[in-house]
Image (tube, grey):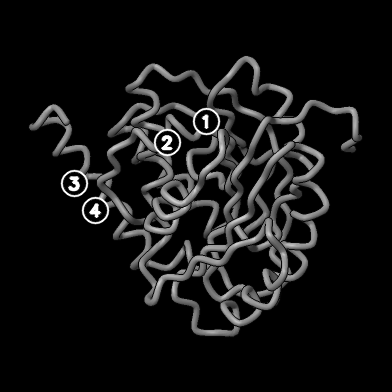
């Protein structure tokens, strides 16, 4: 439970990657407008539409109309999850950045547990207590995590958990080479190379009620694995 006397960040940028999430957006934004003001003195909420083909953009524009804390940023085409992360980092203007997915599988109020640690850590990342997306996707995610750790030795509990609070200056300094589902892991790898210590906090994972997940699609997984291998080779042979 969040109370008015809890610790607040000086300023916070929040962004939500959106691709065909028309059924979830209104609930997500209402939850954000209820929770985020309790956790930051100054804040902004960015809805980043990645070329949605449903009414996500139209709904987003309606939601932000007349609200100075909300902004829509839209990619003309579906560029991929990593490109959304890079856009969110680039467009964020406040001291901390928090992002999570727009599928309502996380409870934003759990961000309060992350804010409590912000005096001691500059990168606070979530791990799902129990994944609820089904056996096939859980297996794919586990194999992908093993593959990434084999290449990069990041060694965190849940490498692709979309619930992260990180200092903005650290993120803006990164030279990210990927633009796929691998980008989230690349961020952690490059932060680790800068000797940034992670605080890992358990978060609750809820079933998706509306819309379809795209992260488990074969082409998405293949692209992420390819970019991970390419990044590994670039680092190994160019000392990037």
Compute the Cα span from label 2 to label 4. Answer: 23 Å
Labels 1 & 2 near each other (Cβ < 8 A):
yes
Which one is earlier in the sequence, the residue at label 3 or at label 1? 1
Compute the Cα span from label 2 to label 3. Answer: 21 Å
Labels 4 & 3 near each other (Cβ < 8 A):
yes
Against 159, residue 108 (above or below) is below
Residue at 45% of width from left, 46% of height from top? 89
User: Could you say which is closer to the camera, residue 54 or residue 212?
Assistant: 54
Q: Which residue is mark 4?
A: 226
Compute the Cα span from label 1 to label 2. Answer: 7 Å
Q: Nearer the viewer, mark 4 or mark 1?
A: 1
Q: Is 235 positioned to the left or the right of 127 in the image?
A: left
Compute the Cα span from label 3 to label 1. Answer: 27 Å
Q: Which residue is mark 1?
A: 167
Labels 2 & 3 near each other (Cβ < 8 A):
no
Labels 4 & 1 near each other (Cβ < 8 A):
no
Q: Nearer the viewer, mark 2 or mark 4?
A: 2
Which of the 4 quarters of the picture holds residue 65?
bottom right
Q: Which residue is mark 2?
A: 171
Compute the Cα span from label 4 to label 1. Answer: 28 Å
User: Could you say which is closer to the camera, residue 179 or residue 3?
Assistant: 3
Disc 1 crowd, CA 10 A, few/some/many (<14, 14-19, 20+): some
Q: Position of residue 232 (x, y in %)?
A: 21, 37
Compute the Cα span from label 4 to label 3. Answer: 6 Å
User: Could you say which is closer to the camera, residue 180 or residue 4?
Assistant: 4
Q: Going by the picture, which residue comes out furthest to the left? A: 237
Q: Is 77 positioned to the left or the right of 106 in the image?
A: left
């Amino acid at each position: 439970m969040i109370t008015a006397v809890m610790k607040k960040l000086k300023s916070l940028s929040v962004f939500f990657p959106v691709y065909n999430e028309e059924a979830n957006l209104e609930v997500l934004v209402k939850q954000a407008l209820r929770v985020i003001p309790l956790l930051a003195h100054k804040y902004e909420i960015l809805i980043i539409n990645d070329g949605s083909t449903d009414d996500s953009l139209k709904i987003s524009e309606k939601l932000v109309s007349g609200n100075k804390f909300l902004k829509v940023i839209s990619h003309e085409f579906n560029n991929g999850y990593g490109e959304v992360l890079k856009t969110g980092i680039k467009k964020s203007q406040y001291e901390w950045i928090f992002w999570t997915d727009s599928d309502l599988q996380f409870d934003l109020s759990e961000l309060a547990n992350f804010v409590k640690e912000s005096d001691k850590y500059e990168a606070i990342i979530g791990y799902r207590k129990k994944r609820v997306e089904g056996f096939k996707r859980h297996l794919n995610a586990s194999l992908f995590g093993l593959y990434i750790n084999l290449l990069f030795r990041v060694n965190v509990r849940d490498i692709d958990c979309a619930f992260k609070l990180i200092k903005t200056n650290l993120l803006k300094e990164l030279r990210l080479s990927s633009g796929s589902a691998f980008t989230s892991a690349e961020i952690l790898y490059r932060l680790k190379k800068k000797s940034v210590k992670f605080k890992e906090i358990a978060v609750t994972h809820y079933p998706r009620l509306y819309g379809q997940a795209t992260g488990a699609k074969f082409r998405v997984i293949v692209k992420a694995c390819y970019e991970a291998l390419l990044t590994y080779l670039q680092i190994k042979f160019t000392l990037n």
